[in-house]
Image: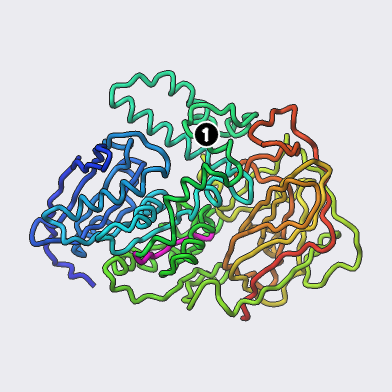
Amino acid sequence: MPKLNRPPLRVTAEYDAPMPMRDGTILRGSVHRPAEGGPYPALLARSPYGEGAFRMIPVTAALEAGFAVVLQHCRGRGNSDGEFRPWADEGRDGHDTIAWITSQPWSNGEVSMTGMSYLAGCALQAAATRPPGLKAVFASMTPHDFHDGLKYHGGALALGSALNWGAMQAALGLMHAAEAGEDVGAAFGALLPAMTDQAAAVRTLPLDAVAGIPWWQEWISHPERDAYWEELAQTLRHDRIEAPVMHVAGWFDLFLSGTLENHRRLGGPLIIGPWSHLTMGASGTGRVDFGFGASAQAIRLEQRQLAFLQGRDTGPAVKIFVMGDDVWRDEESWPPARAVETRYHLHADGLLSPEAPATDEPAVFTFDPRDPVPTTGGPTLLADATNAGPQDQRDVERRPDVLCYTTEALGADVEVTGPVSVTLRAETSAAATDWTAKLVNVHPDGRAMSVIDGIVRTSDSSGTYTIDLVATSQVFKAGHRIRLEISSSNFPRFDRNPGTGHPAAKAAEDDLVIAHQRVLKGSYLTLPIVPR
């Protein structure tokens, strides 16, 4: 423990430090270092969000641990020159920034990188360039790919988060241009609808009519993983990353799948808490309070981050928060090898059970894309930040276009820890459709709290489909019930499937097709059951 009477650390700070990139563009940032001693290893964070994003960086703790800290604005952001292009320049710019740091007289030639979300992506992209001097990376809640798991999930556009993030970045870009003396009045006017009324903006049809976001047309016109996404993917080559990486994820984070895939490809310690993208420091997420012990502070995550970056981490390989029991647990690996994949079959009468149904009767519903199922919680990053995490699904489940499959009341606790998926045999009257699934924890008092969800977009009218619900660690307590919801929309988390079989981004209101859906025998939920 630090001594309470320790004198304050004297710090030297330089603001707006110019850092030249290989193409001549000048990026800028602040440099903080102990005023005495040295040379020092550096901790680097790069952000496209302005000064506010640096509040999540443990600057004071890093300085006290012996780091110099460099906080840099990405190109075209803050007071850095150049044009911001999402993800396109971060690998090269990160590499050049590390080269600048190691050339400074106060540097000992060693650099670590840290960050969450886009900042963590900047770190991984820099690591993929193998810059000399990069020693370690702390990457929290960040995707592994720019198409799969970021802008698209299961083939569907992540509409709400794409619009929310895109509008924010467009606004930051216009502010940057205005500070440079440009006239941005017309551009702000075009962006205003997406900024001020996203509930209306997400309902814009066709989607390619959304205005004001410079990259919007590129994102929505490439629904498949084509050359556009492959070019971006070359900036995040996991096979080129040599620096050790610590990964942090949240059970309700929209980048859970990306963080788990980064861990699978790169190795390194993994920590998963009961957090959404914005609640790592909180004890609760959505409508569930997991207690102070669930917070990042409770497990001293900041201290462990710095220990890892200094090469002295002795923590467990995997640390997860087990919801329901509401405790942290150390594991040797992810997913736990002792988990047993167990099938729960979908019965047409609404039963969910390990036994297969005896009859061939299908379950049916009608999907109208003009009245999609509203997003209610889950791994979201919407304009309404409260619409995230576990939320009560009872209003959703009263809709006629949501099928509910429910177990009998459990006679004992059932722990589900690991990857979760649904195998769905289904048919639609439309040329194409979406199938959505949501795992729900039904309490004895009737509350139906969401756990995790997923989607798959189909290009045909019948088949057997896999819906990836990513993963969880949830104990369904004795007396509770396990429920699975099946539908064809989760809006605006995902865009609506017009049912035409043609690109969704081009569909107008008059193009939308009402679909008659059938869920067939042979459909099942796969849960990783951990023996209690």
How many residues crowd around disc 1 within 10 Å: few (fewer than 14), some, or many (20 or more)? Answer: some
Most common secondary structure along the magenta stretch: strand
Local SS, label 1? helix
Q: How many marks?
A: 1
Magenta residue span: 243-251
In the image, residue 57 lies at what x, y percent? 31, 54
In the image, residue 202 lies at what x, y percent? 59, 34
Residue 69 visible (yes or no)? yes
Above or below, comparing residue 187 to residue 284 in the picture = above
Residue 319 drawn in magenta? no
Above or below, comparing residue 24 to residue 210 in the picture = below
> Which residue is drawn at the image coordinates 46% and 76% (left, top)?
330
Above or below, comparing residue 326 to residue 102 in the picture = below
Q: Is residue 284 left or right of residue 451?
A: left
Q: Which amino acid, by three-letter code, is at mark 1?
A: Trp
In the image, residue 54 lies at what x, y percent? 31, 48
> In which quadrant of the rendered view does residue 136 lie?
bottom left
Q: Quadrant of the C terminus?
A: bottom right
Residue situated in front as seen by the camera: 140 or 399: 140
Residue 384 visible (yes or no)? no
Q: Quadrant of the N terminus?
A: bottom left
> In which quadrant of the rendered view does residue 467 lie?
bottom right
Q: Is residue 214 left or right of residue 39?
A: right
The residue wearing badge 1 is 216
Residue situated in front as seen by the camera: 367 or 462: 462
Residue situated in front as seen by the camera: 479 or 261: 261
